[in-house]
Image: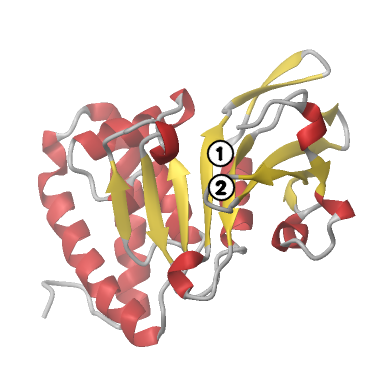
Amino acid sequence: MPARPDLWQRVDTLPDHPMSAINGAVVGNGVRLRIEIGPKSKVGSDYYRVILISDSMGEADEPVCGGLINRGAFPGFNWVEVTDFQGRLTINGEAIQIPEGIDGNIVKTLGRLVPIGGHLMMEYDSAHRAITAKALAQRVPPVATPLGGMMFAANCGTWFTDWYISEGGREGPRKLQGFRAVDAEHAARRGREMLEGLEAFLGRAKDCDWDVQAACIPIAQATVTNLRARLDVPDGPMP
């Protein structure tokens, strides 16, 4: 992430930039986002960073997250990546833990920028994503992890790729890549595959560490209920 202040500008000075659509978005009670755009990467993507502003406390002293956004002619060229997420911030010198609700709303807001066939990539190397990293290492389906569940709720979880080998440099940290469906048929096909994977996980979840079970079983159960209703699949064994 570029550090020089002179390389960044507020997105409200760039009204045609795609991230202007979420500038000022409300993500909590009296909490909104301010977006800044940085230079282009070596491959032509734009760096961005997100600052939280609280009506009661003021502006955070550092960005809550940042990464890259890309636009292109084909669906797969349209993506948003979060390469850095801070679970704790300081506002006017006071340390603040990011609440789960605001975390999820930030993910949902970024997901609004992902068009049909595009994808959202979220790092899970940070301390804030430690349970997700541990769960993925224990073969929990991505959608049943705390981060994957938020991406699914943001409509960027039709299916996932887990980039679990951090290669450094341009590849960046370990991350989940969640895709938005191309069409209804695509969503239904992937949804049935996901449902089968979640049912299998719930049958073996007892083998996971307790903290992983506590975090992931409720997400898996809620997602199963969601998918069965969406796909009109009754309770019981999959047909």
Marks 2/1: CA–CA distance: 6 Å
Q: Which mark is residue 104?
A: 2
SS under mark 1:
helix
Residue drawn at the location 75% of the way across and 62% of the way down: 21
**Could you tell me residue 4's position as x and y percent?**
74, 26
Of residues 17 and 226, which is closer to you in this image? 17
**Could you tell me residue 65's position as x and y percent?**
61, 37
Of residues 68 and 217, which is closer to you in this image? 68
| Crowd band around label 1 with a 10 angstrom C-alpha radius: few (<14), some (14–19), many (20+) | few
In which image quadrant can residue 158 be found? Answer: bottom left
**Could you tell me residue 77's position as x and y percent?**
48, 66
**Could you tell me residue 40's position as x and y percent?**
64, 47
Q: Which mark is residue 100?
A: 1
Of residues 168 and 218, which is closer to you in this image? 168
| Crowd band around label 2 with a 10 angstrom C-alpha radius: few (<14), some (14–19), many (20+) | some
Marks 2,1: beta carbons within 8 A = yes
| Residue 26 in the figure: left or right of residue 127 | right
Q: Is residue 64 visible?
A: yes
SS under mark 2:
helix
